[in-house]
Amino acid sequence: MTGMRMARLMAEKTLSVAEASELSGFSERVIRTAIRRGELASLMPHGAVRGRRVRRRDLERWMREMGS
């Protein structure tokens, strides 16, 4: 991942599943499973055809919980 891409991901308030995967180091499958189980909160933007979004703060909290 390039430095500019990492900086952009860190500045965003919400992330796609792919971005959350890249930022966290977990696979997209793990991220989607955590969302489906209710372990990781996600949003479905109004009018979105597809693509859940994850708030960065929720991802960080989930990652802390995964580490404990």
Image: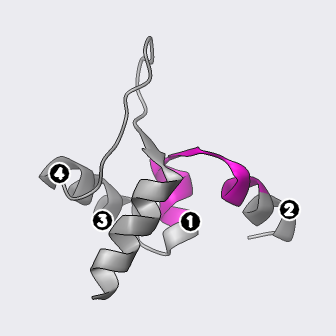
Percent of width and height locating residue 48: 45, 18
Badge 2 is on which residue? Answer: 4
Look at the picture and state if 65 lies above or below 17.
below
Q: Tag 1 or tag 4, which sits nearer the N-term? A: 1
**Label 4 element class:** loop
Badge 3 is on which residue? Answer: 30
Indicate the amino acid at tag 2.
Met
Question: Residue 22: which numbered mark, if any?
Answer: 1
For the point 39% across and 73% down, which residue is it? Answer: 63
Work out how far the residue at label 2 is from the one at label 4, CA to CA, in angstroms: 31 Å
Work out how far the residue at label 1 is from the one at label 2, CA to CA, in angstroms: 14 Å
Left or right side of 22 for 46 = left
Task: Kindly indicate the quadrant of the structure image that contains residue 23.
Answer: bottom right
Look at the picture and state if 29 lies above or below 46.
below
**In the image, is residue 9 part of the stretch drawn in magenta?**
yes
Q: Tag 2 or tag 3, which sits nearer the N-term? A: 2
Badge 4 is on which residue? Answer: 38
Tell me the mark number nearer the camera, choosing from 4 and 1.
Answer: 4
The 10 Å Cα crowd at callout 1, few under 14, some 14 to 19, many 20 or more, is some
Query: What segment is highlighted magenta in the picture?
Result: 8-22
The 10 Å Cα crowd at callout 2, few under 14, some 14 to 19, many 20 or more, is few
Q: Please name whichever residue, 41 or 50, is drawn nearer the observer in this view of the structure.
A: 41
Indicate the amino acid at tag 1.
Glu
For the point 30% across and 48% down, which residue is it? Answer: 41
Dominant secondary structure (helix, strand or loop) of the stretch shown in magenta: helix
